[in-house]
Amino acid sequence: MTDRTISNAAALSGWRKSTYSGSEAGSCLEVLDDHLSGVPVRDSKSPHGPALVFPAPGWSSFVTALKDGAFLSSDGLVQRLS
């Protein structure tokens, strides 16, 4: 896969809110399952904006790391990655 973006994410249907999105309005990621090129991810505040497409194995590893707490600081908050 060479193109890792979709310029208008609204052109695709079937988006769902990520289970790791915050409950506050405005902090939601949406993902699209079963896309042939990988896992598209978009900002729900900008549905007509771009989506990033991650290779499925990389996305799976990222989600597993989240579940395992790999990005949590000692106070239980998500760390900022630099």
Image: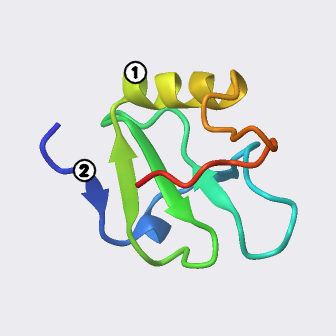
Q: Is residue 71 shown above or below 45?
A: above
Q: Is residue 63 left or right of residue 25?
A: left
The answer to whether the residues at label 1 and label 2 have Cβ atoms under 8 Å apart is: no
Image quarter hosting the N terminus: top left
Q: Is residue 76 left or right of residue 4?
A: right
Q: Identify which residue is drawn at 42% across, 37% down.
A: 35
Q: Identify which residue is drawn at 73% across, 53% down.
A: 21
Please provide percent x and percent y for residue 36: 35, 33
Callout 1, which amino acid?
Answer: Pro
Q: Is residue 16 left or right of residue 59?
A: right
- Among the two numbered marks 1 and 2 on one chain, the one whose residue lies closer to the N terminus: 2
Callout 2, which amino acid?
Answer: Arg
Please provide percent x and percent y for residue 38: 36, 35
Please provide percent x and percent y for residue 62: 51, 30
Q: Identify which residue is drawn at 87% across, 61% down.
A: 23
Of 50 and 72, nearer the camera is: 72
Q: Residues within 10 Å of mark 2 (few under 14, many from 20)?
A: some
Q: Which residue is mark 2?
A: 4
Number of callouts in the render?
2
SS for callout 1: helix
Q: Quadrant of residue 7?
A: bottom left
Q: Which residue is mark 1?
A: 57
